[in-house]
Image (cartoon, helix red, strand yellow):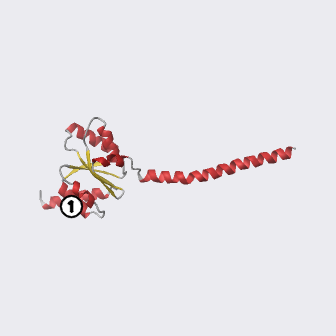
Amino acid sequence: MKKEDKAIIIEKIGKTIGEYSCLYLTQTAGLNAEKTSALRRECFKSDVKMMCVKNTLLKIALEAAEIDYSGLYDTLHGETTLMLSNTGNAPAKLIKKFRQKDETLPMLKGAFVEETVYIGEDQLETLAHIKSKNELIADVIGLLQSPAKNVISALQSGGNKLHGILETLSNK
């Protein structure tokens, strides 16, 4: 491959990585064509971008990025498939769902989610249970609304009591 071609590919990889907030490095080398196509379809349905990349080109693209991905460099060996998403737990859930069919692949090598590096297969369960930014915002809003709802309902019930007492007194 010519140097110019490599530079174009590195730039394309870097641009694609920049469009997503979460990066997963997986190994899919043992999947046959049918299973790989099924995985690609699942990725498309889950809004996860899947790319097979050369480790050296990926490392150069990661080094050129504004974000520090240095914790993932040790996982760049063997075959690497890149899974990109804007939802932190989407690729992990997809991998778990795909594995329910008695698969051992895709295998998680590492991930960069919410500015944190996760290395190794044992982190898959942790990643699958991470809440997305929107889910966390919804939880905070729910917690903030709960006391306000309690105060409003107490005021409304108190107003009904007061109205009932006044009505009873006026009838006497």
Residue ranking furthest to the top:
101
- The residue singled out by tag 1 in the image is 60
Circle 1 — which element? Answer: helix
Left or right of residue 135, residue 170 in this image: right
Residue 29: percent from left, percent from top: 19, 44
The residue depicted at 15 percent of the width and 61 percent of the height is: 4
Q: Residues within 10 Å of mark 1 (few under 14, many from 20)?
A: some
Depth order, front residue of 40/156: 156
Left or right of residue 150, residue 61 in this image: left
Three-letter code, disc 1:
Ile
Left or right of residue 152, residue 134 in this image: left
Depth order, front residue of 27/7: 27
Residue 59: percent from left, percent from top: 21, 59
The residue depicted at 18 percent of the width and 57 percent of the height is: 56
Residue ranking furthest to the right:
172
Residue ranking furthest to the front:
122
In the rendered image, is residue 47 in sight?
Answer: no
The residue depicted at 16 percent of the width and 58 percent of the height is: 5
Residue 121: percent from left, percent from top: 28, 47
From the viewer's perspective, is residue 140 above or below residue 96? Answer: below
